[in-house]
Image (tube, grey):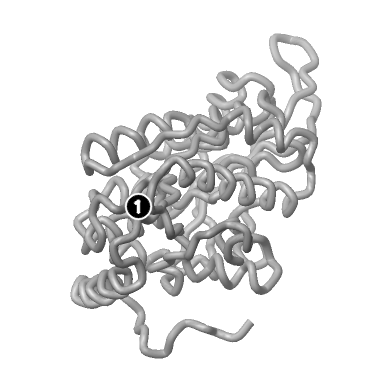
Amino acid sequence: MADVRPESLKRITTKEMADAFIADQIAAIKEQVGDKKVLLALSGGVDSSVVAALLIKAIGTNLVCVHVNHGLLRKGEPEMVCKVFRDELGANLIYVDAVDRFLDLLAGVTDPEQKRHIIGEEFIKVFAEEAAKLDGIAFLAQGTIYPDILESEQGIKAHHNVGGLPPELDFELVEPVKYLYKDEVRVVGSALGLPDKMVFRQPFPGPGLGVRCPGAITRDRLEAVRESDAILREEFEKAGLAGKVWQYFTVVPDFKSTGIKDGKRAFEWLCIVRAINTVDVVQVTVEPIDYDLMCRITDRITHEVPGINRVLYDYTPKPTATVEYE
C-alpha cells in the first residue's frame, strides 16, 4: 500500500506541534459535525481517550461515550474506565454489559480474522442500538490510527475500526487521529491535558483479550488469560518496568502440555509472555527480562492461575511477528 499520510502532516514530536494539530482537528470536527451528536466507542485505551478529549473540546456535551464490556477486557478494566471518565473527566458515559452477547457469538470460532470480524460487526450493532435510544446521533467517532490502516490494507490483519461502516447504518465517521502513529497520539494526549495514567497506558487491541486467546474462545481459558495478564502487570510494576516497556501481555493458546502439580499429572495450557518496545508499531523489538523476575512471574502464574502449568517467553520481533498473536 502506498503511504497515504498527508505530506503536510509532519511527525508530531513536541507540544507546540501537538497544539497546532489539536487546533486544526477541533476546527475540522466542528465543521464536520456542526450541532449534531457523536457516538464514541470508548474503550479507555490511549487512542479512544485522545479522540474523546478532542471531541469534548470541539463539541462538549454533544459527545456521547459508550463503553462496551464485551467480556474481553483486562481484569478491573470496566470499573476503571467508568471511574476515570465519569468521576475524573465528567464524560457523558453509557455503560453496556454485553459479555454474554459477544462470547456466545464467538463460541466455537477458531479463525482469527473471523473472530475479529464478529467482534467488529457486533460492536457496530451495539452502537447502532445505543444510537437508536438517543436523539440526534449522526456520527460515529473511532480511535483509528495509521498502523491500523496499514496492516488492514496490506492484508496482515483486519482491524475492527478500519474499512468504514455498513451502508445500512446512517452514521458518518469521525476519525481525527487516523494519520497518527501511536507515539504521536501520546504527545497529543499530553498536550490535551489527559492524565499520564491514561496517555501512557499500554495500547490494547479493539478485540481485546480475544486476540490473546488463540483458537476457539472458552470462558475458562479467557479467565486464564485475564488472570495471568494481571499477574504480569503487577510484577512489572513492582520491578519498575511499567513505564519503561511499551507493551506487555500474556497469551494462552488452545493447546495443552503435560505437567506435574501436587505430584500428579497435569495436562494444562501453557502461557506465553510477550514484552516489546517500539516507536511507531511498524517495527518492534523484544524487551530482555531479568531471569529472577521471569522465575517469579512463572511461579505465580503456574500456582495462582487455574489450568496453566507452563510459561514461555516470546523473543520474536516485528517483523517477522506482529504485536498480537491474531
Few, some or many residues within 10 Å of mark 1 (<14, 14–19, 20+): many
Above or below, 247 against 254 in this view is below
Above or below, 303 against 10 in this view is above
Above or below, 186 against 18 in this view is above
Q: Position of residue 92 (x, y in %)?
A: 29, 42
| Residue toward you, 101 or 290 | 101
Quadrant position of the N terminus in the picture:
bottom right
Under circle 1, the secondary element is: helix
Left or right: residue 155 versus residue 242 is right
Q: Position of residue 4 (x, y in %)?
A: 52, 83
Left or right: residue 83 versus residue 155 is left
Which quarter of the figure has residue 108?
top right
Which quarter of the figure has residue 35?
bottom left
Rendered residue at 54%/27% (across/down)? 227
Q: Is residue 13 visible?
A: no
Q: Position of residue 36 (x, y in %)?
A: 34, 60
Which quarter of the figure has residue 153?
bottom right
The residue wearing badge 1 is 49
Q: Position of residue 207 (x, y in %)?
A: 59, 47
| Residue toward you, 234 or 24 | 24
| Residue toward you, 268 or 57 | 57
Rendered residue at 41%/71% (across/down)? 180
Q: Which amino acid type is shown beneath numbered disc 1?
A: Ser
